[in-house]
Image (cartoon, grey):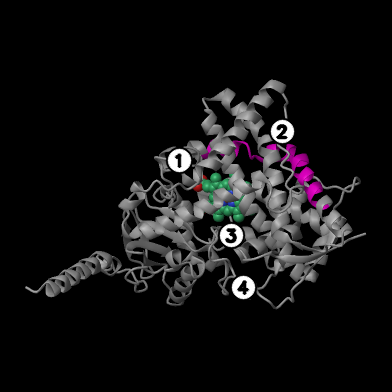
Amino acid sequence: MEPFLITISLVCVLGALIYIYLSWNFNYWRNRNVNGPRPNLVFGNVPALIKHNRHMAFDMQEIYEKYKKSGERFVGIFMTRNPQILVIDPKTVREIMVSNFKAFRGNESSLWINRNVEKVSIRNPFFCLTEEWKERRIDVVGGLSANRLKSAIPIIFGACNKLTEFVRNELAQSKNVIDLKAICYNYTVEVVSDFIWGINADAFKSGKTANVILEMSRNLLDTSFKRTSFYYMSGLAPFLRNLSKMRFFPKESDDFFMKIQKDALELRLRNKNDRPDYLNYLIQLSEKKNVSLIDMIGHSMTVLLDAFETSAAMMYHALYYLASNQTAQNKLRKEIMDNLDEHNGISYDTLMELPYLDQCINETIRLTSPIPVFSRRCIEQTFLENSENVNIQIDPGMMLHIPTYAIHHDPEIFPNPNDFIPERFNDGFAKELTQKGSFLPFGDGPRICAGMRLGQLETKAGVFEIIRNFKLSRKDDNTSKHIVDPGAFIIGLAGDLLVEFELIK
Ligand code: HEM
């Protein structure tokens, strides 16, 4: 045969083999009588995970909206070529996360980590496989109880003071327009450094980018985004995941925080300083049970990661929505002023229970949904009832996705879903919706966010501090919309969020 014909034949055979490989699983859901969208040969049903043309939350939202209309409780989708489930019905959400948690106690993030090369992050409950998850979670949350946070309130207010001082100084120099993102990240870095290790990060002093703790924390998140992208792309050939030495968190950040932890620990043991912070808790924990230095670093990094990024995102979005809505801002300011104590301050209990502040935070977290989709992995064979009341068998290993962003923007649950309306959370509505599986800002069930209380405290304290001291207004006109950043790990508005600050006399 002609060499040309041989080449053509080989290319055709190769093409056919690739096609068969990529589409091999595509009958998986049809064979099980589960409805779902037709997958793209290469990208499956969630192309944004690989293309990054928009945030993947929107791919999920499209599927959710289409199949909610046809009354499905869940649909079969494909992440590249891998069959998975997208949950639609809130009762099924509750069943997976709460009542049948035993069968669905795994999650997808435990698979993102390369366990051969990472020693610190594998200690974070978010990345733990089911066997070690429970113990690690108990150890982490022990240091975040209401009583411990109550004692640590001076630490949080210390960071609030630095925040106000910084803004006041800017205003004194006629720099009235300030990027909310920059100040909120500086604030959360101040909180975490002081709360975890008793370190003064001086984030506001060193400007926008020069602070080393801030840079290292950012570094952690940038690398993790690359690793998750790789994880989804390698869904086409999963064996690559084990071959790759790519890390979720960069080694230099691990080493940096390891040194901070060691130094802070040595100093604390030498000075016998009984400070109400997380390091103090870890020392007490190590006196009770065998906790290695690397365990301590793992727990500290767990707190660092979310108390830095997710809480900052909550705070700058809340302030941005308040700057866009003067009525809500004035109402909140009045509530704050009415609840100041005789020293012009506020107690932990009062702060955490201010009803309108709580509504503003709930509305922000609904609108933004920082973790827009979370997953559960089936660990034991079980069944889910479909819309025709037929039990569908779910096998161990099956991944199920809960599209919180889509649920939080469902107009049947939240009318005018794109508007900031804190009043919709009047009268305990948030709790009622969570129990119905329709409002899940921190997840639900035994795997609910381990740092919910700290995240709320940090955010509420920061918003309280800004709103009582400054009047905020949007610099751009209220109609211009920021797009959601497609390349970010958590969901959030892209670009600087510029807001005009005015000191309240
Ligand atoms: C306001 C900020 C925060 C938000 C919106 C948030 C949101 C979430 C969500 C949605 C989940 C997934 C829950 C699920 O799968 O059911 C989660 C898990 C988790 N969060 Fe947070 N979080 C925040 C702050 C924090 C903080 C400050 C910590 C510090 C310790 C933290 C630690 C964790 C951990 C360890 C998990 C994994 C829990 C497990 O799998 O057992 N989070 N968070």
- Answer whether labels 2 and 1 touch (C-beta < 8 Å): no
Q: Tag 3: residue type? A: Pro
Of callouts 2 and 1, the N-terminal one: 1
Quadrant where the C terminus sits is: bottom right
Q: Position of residue 79 (x, y in %)?
A: 38, 63
- The residue to which callout 4 is attached is 417
Amino acid identity at mark 2: Pro
Q: Give the camera-side residue of 462 and 133.
A: 462
In the displayed structure, would residue 124 be above or below residue 92?
A: above
Q: Residues within 10 Å of mark 1 (few under 14, many from 20)?
A: some
Q: Is residue 120 above or below residue 482?
A: above
Q: Nearer the viewer, mark 4 or mark 1?
A: 1
Q: Magenta includes 157?
A: yes
Label 4 CB less than 8 angstroms from ligand 1:
no
Identify residue type, mark 1: Glu
Magenta span includes 358: no
Checking the image for residue 370, the label placed there is: 3
In the image, is 454 to the left or to the right of 110?
A: right
Residue hosting label 1: 118
Mark 3: give few (<14), some (14-19) or many (20+) Cα within 10 Å. many
Q: Nearer the viewer, residue 131 or 293?
A: 293
Q: Secondary structure at mark 3?
A: loop
| Residue mark closest to the camera, 1 vs 3 | 1
User: Could you tell which of marks 3 and 4 lies nearer the N-terminus?
Assistant: 3
Give the residue number, with chain letter if any, for mark 2: 276
Measured as percent of width and height from the top left, residue 227 is found at: 45, 53
